[in-house]
Image (tube, coloured by chain):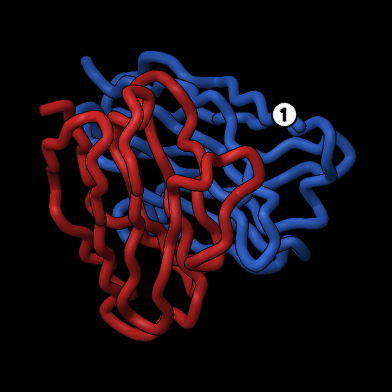
Amino acid sequence: DIQMTQSPSSLSASVGDGVTITCRASQTISSYLNWYQHKAGKAPKLLIYAASSLQSGVPSRFSGSGSGTDFTLTISSLQPEDFATYYCQQGYSTPYTFGQGTKLEIK
Amino acid sequence: VQLLESGGGLVQPGGSLRLSCAASGFTISSYGMNWVRQAPGKGLEWVSAISASGTGRSYADSVKGRFTISRDNSKNTLYLEMNSLRAEDTAVYYCAKFATSAPSDYWGQGTLVTVSS
């Protein structure tokens, strides 16, 4: 099984800050990597698919990069609505594992 | 596009439950479909997948042998049959179609399963 190691597990930042979340796969997953934003009581929202493609309707302050085993999600200028939990997820092979999540909190 | 889960509820340990996920706006038989869950205070956990053809089914080790994924193409509905339920199966269960190289990514609103005596 492919393990997804996401870091940090939590992050405190201010509105306007830029932040980066990393995700490492235990073996190569090519570019089969999605990033989700999850808020309590709601369905996860796709931000980035195929490692670096921005989902339609998602603000351009979100960006993704990487391939193989190392991936990053960057938020360039945090807005109040961005404080949530973020997950990476590999779609290369089953089980389609998620990272442990990064809880982004307001400083 | 909409996915609407139903069938959650309170069940005793060792009991069974069947979750349904009715799709509209797209045809589930054209895509691989998944179940994902989130236990209280925990992260997202992929549970099971069924291939577009319906012949391929996969399960997380934590549910293998107890859960069965299936679908009824005529009803455009995905199912998850859950047997021998344990307290650790308590979670919100989502059905989902993941994006891959194309951006179509759909999730239901979730249904809560509580396993408790």
Q: Amino acid at mark 1?
A: Gln
The quadrant of the picture occupied by the N terminus of chain B is top right
Residue A83, visible in the rendered structure = yes
Residue A1 location in percent, x, y? Answer: 33, 75
Q: Position of residue B81 (x, y in %)?
A: 53, 39
Q: Which of the pair A16/A104 is nearer the observer? A: A16
Q: Color of chain B here?
A: blue
Q: Position of residue B70 (x, y in %)?
A: 66, 48
Q: Is residue B47 left or right of residue A21?
A: right
- Residue in view at x 14 percent, y 53 percent: A8
Q: Looking at the image, which residue is at 89% across and 39% down?
A: B74
Residue identified by numbered label 1: B2
- Residue at horizontal 20%, vertical 38%? A103
Q: Which chain is red?
A: A
Residue B28 horizontal/vertical position (percent): 77, 47
Whether A90 is drawn above or below A102: the answer is below
Q: On the picture, is A25 further left or further right than B79? A: left
Residue at horizontal 25 percent and vertical 63 percent from the top: A22
As displayed, is residue A58 above or below residue B3?
Answer: below
Which quarter of the picture shows residue B50?
bottom right
SS for callout 1: strand
Residue occupying the far right of the picture: B74
